[in-house]
Structure formats: C-alpha cells, structure tokens
C-alpha cells in the first residue's frame, strides 16, 4: 500500500529527515516538503530524490514555499517551528510556535480538508490542539507524536542495560512530552518477561529518570538544536501505520474524551492507528501511582496551554 501524496511541513532537521525516511519506505509516490525558507525545501527535495536510484526508491520529494503542491495530500507531518532564541521565555516560544502552527493548519484545511495531521512541533500536546481547533478536524485526524519517541529512548536504554535486542523490549511511555511523562513499568517486558525480573529496581529507576530527560541530554550535546533522528523515526512509524492500515498500538498524543478520566486535552495514551488515523484510544488498567502520574502530567500540559490564545 502506498499513498499518492504525503506532505511534510518544515524542512529543518526533523522535517527533512522525515521526508527522506518516507521516501525510502515508499510510503507515498510524492513527498512534498514545505518551508518558508527560500530554496531550502527545493534543494533538499532534489537531493533526496536523487538518492532514490541508489537507495532503490521511486518516491519523489518535491520542495515548495507554498501549499499548491500539497493539494490533496492524504497525510501531513507538521514540524514547522522556531527553536528557542537567547532571551526568549518558554511562554514566548509557545506563542510563536502556536502562531506558526495556526497558519500552517489554515493552509492544510484549504488544500486537504480530508487529510490526517501528525503533529511534531513542540510543545506538541498544545500544538496538536491548535491544529485541531483551527482545522476543525475530528480527533481521528489530528494526532501528536511524542510517546513513540519517549518509548524508543526508554527501550534503547533498557536494551543496552539488559544486553538484549532493542526489538525484544516492549514498553509504553504515556503522558505529556516533558519531565512529567509516565513510563509504565508494569507493562514493560522483554519478549513478554516482566522487565523487573531482568534488571534491578535502582537501575530501572535511573533509566526512567534518564528517559524523562532524554531530549535535554541531546540538546546538551547539540547546543544549537534538538534531537531529530529518533523524532523523525517516531513520526514515520505513525505515517506507516496509517498508510499501510496496520492497526498498530502505539503511544501517541490523542484528544481525550473521558478516557483515563481525562477530557478536553491532548495527552499521550495507547492509540490504535490505521487507515482512519486514530481508530481507538485503548484504555488500559493503570496502577494508582501511574494514574496519579498521568493526571499530574495532564496538569503540566494544561499549564503550558494557558498562555496560548488563537
Ligand atoms: N511554515 C513552514 N515552515 C516553517 C514555518 C512556517 N510558517 N515557520 C518556520 N518554519 C520552518 C523553519 O524555516 C525551519 O526550516 O520550520 C523548520 C524547523 O526546522 P529546525 O529549526 O531545524 O527545527 P527541527 O529540529 O526540525 O524541529 C522542528 O520539531 O521536534 C520538534 O521541538 C522540535 O518544534 C521543533 C520541531
């Protein structure tokens, strides 16, 4: 299964890597890469298309500064935004990115009113709301990417500590994308074996803590940017689940309507993704501590959200 057209908005680190991965997996014939920067999306798109003969894919990546080429796209991955500049408060950043995501969402609504939006721009739990609000799309068609990334970090750290394949670690990290995220130890297994049987509790706690600060650890090294390889992998896994109608169960940010006792906000929960986008929020049993942590995380999302007006 392949789609005709998928658009990635923002041709920066996350966006360009996402476009390349979508093309390499041939998830769409045409991958449109939109950015406001003159020349950059066209240059990157051409370069990526020219890797096709060597990598063996026939998808074409088309760069653009407007949304004409994106008309009729079935899926949009939104990565547009600006990084925090010196002297800029976190609230200023949220407001600026909300304005960017608002204008992007208006364009998406115009050229592809039936599309599915995957939000990557941060703070993504709030940006997903901006997109949902501006487009008026139902919750099935606006989903945020964070849980897969947080879970991937958790899985990578665990695999290293236990010395097993990353493929054999199953886990779910729920909650907002920030320090308050909620790694679910009770559902973390190594090929079905509860992880607590294979690693000491203190080591596990240290890994949970490192996972919470996973994004910051990378920013600490990169200094002028944030992570993009693993974030783009997360976004593309969601795209693939939708394009190939896989019905995958993945941790994603979804608009909640009473699930887990929460309503009227985006937060990371187990989601079934298929051709219809978010096909179901899967409610699972949580321990008392996990439920409390999820509620605390939801409060943190609301706090970031308060500064945004559309
Ligand atoms: N429309 C399209 N693109 C835009 C717009 C806009 N209105 N405003 C900014 N952009 C583009 C920028 O020109 C830039 O090329 O978004 C791109 C962002 O790229 P980077 O600065 O490299 O940032 P990146 O590392 O890709 O992160 C993008 O994803 O993971 C999140 O926190 C991250 O919010 C950030 C986003």
Image: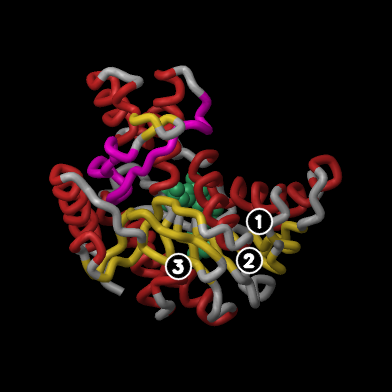
Q: CA distance from mark 2 to mark 3?
A: 32 Å
Q: CB of mark 2 within 8 Å of CB of mark 3?
A: no
Q: Residue at x 72, y 54 (%)?
A: 26
* Residue 223 in view here: no
At x 24%, y 51%, the residue is: 285
For mark 2, what is the residue? 65
**In the image, 60: left or right of 218?**
right
Q: Which residue is mark 3?
A: 279
As helix, strand or loop, the secondary structure at mark 3 comes to strand
Q: Residues within 10 Å of mark 3 (few under 14, many from 20)?
A: some
Q: Which of marks 3 and 1 precedes in the sequence?
A: 1
- The residue beneath circle 1 is 41
Q: Earlier in the sequence, mark 2 or mark 1?
A: 1
Stretch in magenta: 165-187
Q: N-terminal of the two: label 2 or label 3?
A: 2
> Do the residues under discs 2 and 1 have CB atoms within 8 angstroms?
yes
């Amino acid at each position: 299964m392949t789609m005709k057209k998928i658009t990635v908005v923002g041709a920066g680190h996350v966006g360009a890597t996402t476009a390349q991965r979508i093309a390499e997996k041939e998830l769409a014939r045409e991958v449109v890469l939109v950015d406001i920067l003159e020349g950059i999306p066209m240059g990157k798109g051409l370069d990526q298309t020219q890797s096709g003969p060597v990598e063996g894919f026939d998808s074409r990546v088309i760069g653009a500064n407007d949304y004409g080429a994106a008309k009729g796209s079935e899926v949009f991955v939104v990565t547009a935004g600006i990084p925090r500049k010196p002297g800029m408060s976190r609230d200023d950043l949220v407001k600026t990115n909300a304005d960017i995501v608002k204008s992007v969402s208006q364009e998406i609504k115009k050229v592809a009113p039936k599309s599915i939006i995957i939000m990557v721009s941060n703070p993504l739990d709030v940006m997903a709301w901006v997109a949902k609000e501006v487009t008026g799309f139902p919750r099935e068609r606006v989903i945020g990417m964070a849980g897969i990334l947080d879970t991937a970090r958790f899985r990578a750290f665990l695999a290293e500590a236990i010395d097993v394949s990353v493929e054999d670690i199953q886990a779910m990290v729920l909650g907002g994308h920030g320090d308050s995220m909620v790694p679910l130890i009770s559902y973390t297994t190594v090929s079905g074996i509860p992880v607590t049987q294979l690693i000491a509790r203190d080591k596990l706690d240290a890994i949970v803590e490192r996972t919470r600060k996973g994004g910051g650890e990378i920013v600490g090294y990169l200094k002028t940017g944030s992570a993009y390889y693993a974030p783009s992998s997360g976004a593309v896994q969601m795209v693939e689940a939708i394009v190939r109608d896989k019905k995958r169960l993945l941790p994603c940010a979804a608009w909640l309507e009473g699930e887990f006792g929460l309503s009227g906000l985006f937060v990371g929960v187990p989601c079934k993704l298929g051709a219809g986008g978010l096909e179901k929020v899967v409610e699972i049993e949580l321990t008392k501590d996990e439920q409390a942590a999820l509620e605390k995380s939801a409060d943190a999302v609301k706090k970031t959200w308060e500064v945004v007006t559309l």
